Amino acid sequence: MRVYFTFEPRLDLRESLIDDFPEISFVFDQSISDDELSQAEILVTYGEDLDEEKIAIAQKLQWIFVASAGIEKMPAQAIAERGIYVSNVRGIHKKPMMETILAHILALKRGLPSIYEQQARGEWKKNISLTELNGSTVMILGPGAIGQEIGRILQALGVHTIGINSTGKMVDYMNETYPITQWVDYVPKADIIISMLPSTPKTKGLITREHFETMKSSAIFMNFGRGDVVKEAVLVEALQERLIAHAVLDVYEAEPLPATSPIWQLNNVTVSPHISSHSSRYVERSLSIFKPSLRKWLNGERRLENEINILRGY
């Protein structure tokens, strides 16, 4: 069995894999190689280095393990036609992303941007607007593994949580849950709206001007899922017209965010360069999912953790 990594984990992580699976031939590369790909039976990748030509080269490939939650850049049709099994690391981001989102929320609630600006100007002023997170209502669009982790911490801080998913079925750490078809009815209740939605045909452009018009004028909108759930023009208009108080963005319709984007010029938006999931422990956590799945695969099992329907996108 030949397992091909198109990235190089730390030396200690590579050694651990080799020690735990002596029967497997591991190849660790810094970028994808057609020669190695043609021999691989299992591919471990971040997903962005694959296209239809690469899939055609990988004639022995049976399983793609994607060390990322997002798979929208992968050649889905080509993978599906070959019947290649796909799984990913869904949920791996929940700790670092929860910390990032909570940090942004608390920074805005407790006036940290203004404090930092005053310090840079050498000013001592106490007339900074400070509010409390306790007692707020937060709506989470897409309360999956990451959304539930956010909900868990927010509830501990005295926050009421509303989950919005495809079915309206209750999930952990949400005080209320409603189907996506009805979410516009509950938007006015939320002080903070956090989108964790993936990019799928059903979610692209899902958030419209109507939704921003029904939000509180004091609301904070946060997008940490995928940027194309809202058109940039719609978001910019909502911020320019002060339909909401602030937006915190980690994902965008076009990435990197173009220098010409009007988002850069707005004073009521926080621009983060899609780094909310970054962590020094990322690869370590990825392998903690990969190893048990690899053991199952070797034992003939074909129902692995985080199995993905490549055409559906999740």
Image (tube, rainbow, N blue to C red):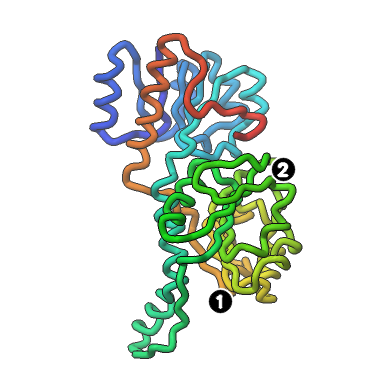
* Residue 255, visible in the rendered structure: no
Secondary element type, mark 2? loop
Q: Quadrant of residue 200?
A: top right
Locate the N terminus and report the quarter of the image it occupies.
top left
Q: Residue at x 34, y 14 (%)?
A: 24
Q: Position of residue 256 (x, y in %)?
A: 55, 56
Q: Mark 2 is on which residue type?
A: Lys
Name which of mark 2 and mark 1 comes first in the sequence: 2
* Residue 258, visible in the rendered structure: yes
Q: Residue at x 69, y 45 (%)?
A: 179
Label drawn at residue 202: 2
Look at mark 1 in the image and give the residue it sits on: 267
- Label count reads 2
Judging depth in this view, the residue of 144 and 97 nearest the camera is 144
Q: Position of residue 204 (x, y in %)?
A: 70, 48
Q: Is residue 230 left or right of residue 10?
A: right
Q: Mark 1 is on which residue type?
A: Asn
Judging depth in this view, the residue of 274 and 190 nearest the camera is 190
Locate the C terminus and report the quarter of the image it occupies.
top right
Task: Report the Cα–Cα distance between label 2 and label 1.
Answer: 31 Å
Q: Residue at x 64, y 23 (%)?
A: 80
